[in-house]
Structures are given as C-alpha cells and as structure tokens.
Amino acid sequence: ADDLGDDMPELVGSHLALLTARVARMEQLHADLLAYSRTGRSANTRIQEVFVESLCRQVFEDEVQRLKRHWDGAQPPVCTLHTIVDIQPQRVAMDSLRATLTALIRNALQHNTGPERNVEVTVGLEDQMIDIIIADDGPGIPERYRDRIFGVFQVLSAGDGSAGSGIGLAL
C-alpha cells in the first residue's frame, strides 16, 4: 500500500485492509493454538511465587496496549483496572495463570464497545485455593451461550470484527 501512495485504487486499499486483518487473526489463532497445546503439560509447568495483583496489572496493561495498536476508531477507549487483592504472594503455575488472566482480561476489554472500559479483578484465598473474579461493564454473555463459551473454537461473533480464535476461554 505504501508503494502505491495516492495512486492506489480504493478497492485495492479495502482488499489490503481485509487481508491485513485476516493475517492478524491467523497469527492470533496460531499463538492461541500453541498456548492451548501446552496447557496442562507438567514438563512446561513453571511454579513460581508471584504477586497476583502485579501480574493482573501487567496483563491488563499489555492488553490495553494491544487494543490500542489494533484500534480503528479515532479515539481509543479509556480502560481502567480496579483490583481488590487480599492475599500475599502465592506459588502458582505462572504460564497457565498468565494465559488464563490474558484470555479473561482480553475478553473483558475486547467485547465492550463503550468509550470507557472498566475491569475489576478481585483476588482472595479460599480453602487454600486462589479465587479470582474478573468483572467488567461490557454487554455480558447471553445466558443461552454461557455453557458453550469455554469450549475450543467457540465464538459468539464471527467475521473480521472483534471475534477471537475461540481458544482463549477454553484455556
């Protein structure tokens, strides 16, 4: 597109934009498939002590930057993270926890269409298990789809819009 400059026909520009969007989706699908293939493998499990709040903040910031890089609108949304954490550092399977948080936070930011996107992460300890609740102010998932969203390749919207690979929540 850069080589053609102002001489590029409008149809060529729209086809290049569509191709670029589809390549980005394919790259995301590839990355998600690799992450899914590694899920639960003991050889790849890296146990590490982590401040869960810090990890949530890091994942949130990464996902906000990702959202802004792919933003088509004039003004990207304002994204805010609120955390309520009532635990000390915990020993966790770092890669699995990061992948899970990334999928949930990405979902919360990506499927909210408002100019402001608020995500609240509550972390606690219950029966020696880490309890993480991620809430957002997006449209939510219709009740009739809630049973299927955690299956592999399940998306609620298709096309080149906001749909992901359908793997993230299955992690």
Image: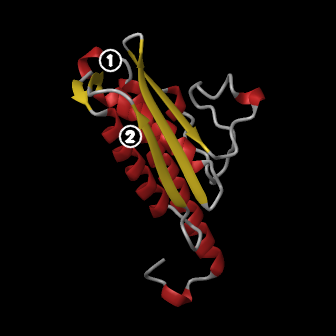
Let me know if residue 34 appears in the view.
no
Instruction: Report the residue at 68% width, 45% height from top.
Output: 158
Q: Position of residue 35 (x, y in %)?
A: 39, 32
Q: Position of residue 39 (x, y in %)?
A: 38, 23
Residue 154 or residue 56, whichever sits in front:
56
Mark 2, secondary structure of its residue? helix
Decide: few, some or many residues near mark 1? Use Cα within 10 Å; few <14, some 14-19, many ≥20: few
Mark 1, secondary structure of its residue? loop
Instruction: Report the residue at 67% width, 25% height from top.
Output: 148
Residue 151 is marked as none
Residue sitting farthest toward the right = 144
Residue sitting farthest toward the top = 127
Q: With 4 as the anchor, is 149 left or right in this view?
A: right
Q: Position of residue 150 (x, y in %)?
A: 59, 26
Indicate the colouring scheme. secondary structure
Q: Earlier in the sequence, mark 2 or mark 1?
A: 1
Q: With 150 as the anchor, is 168 left or right in this view?
A: left
- Depicted 67 relative to depicted 147: above or below: below
Mark 1 lies on residue:
41
Of the residues shown, which amino acid type is indicated by label 2?
Cys
Residue 29 or residue 49, whichever sits in front:
49
Q: Position of residue 156 (x, y in %)?
A: 69, 38
Q: With 170 as the anchor, is 99 left or right in this view?
A: left
- Depicted 141 relative to depicted 38: above or below: below
Residue 122 or residue 105, whichever sits in front:
122
Mark 2 lies on residue:
56
User: Are the two marked residues, 2 and 1, in contact with CB atoms closer than 8 angstroms?
Assistant: no
Of the residues shown, which amino acid type is indicated by label 1?
Arg
Instruction: Report the residue at 53% width, 89% height from top.
Output: 6
Q: With 18 as the anchor, is 129 left or right in this view?
A: left
- Depicted 36 relative to depicted 8: above or below: above
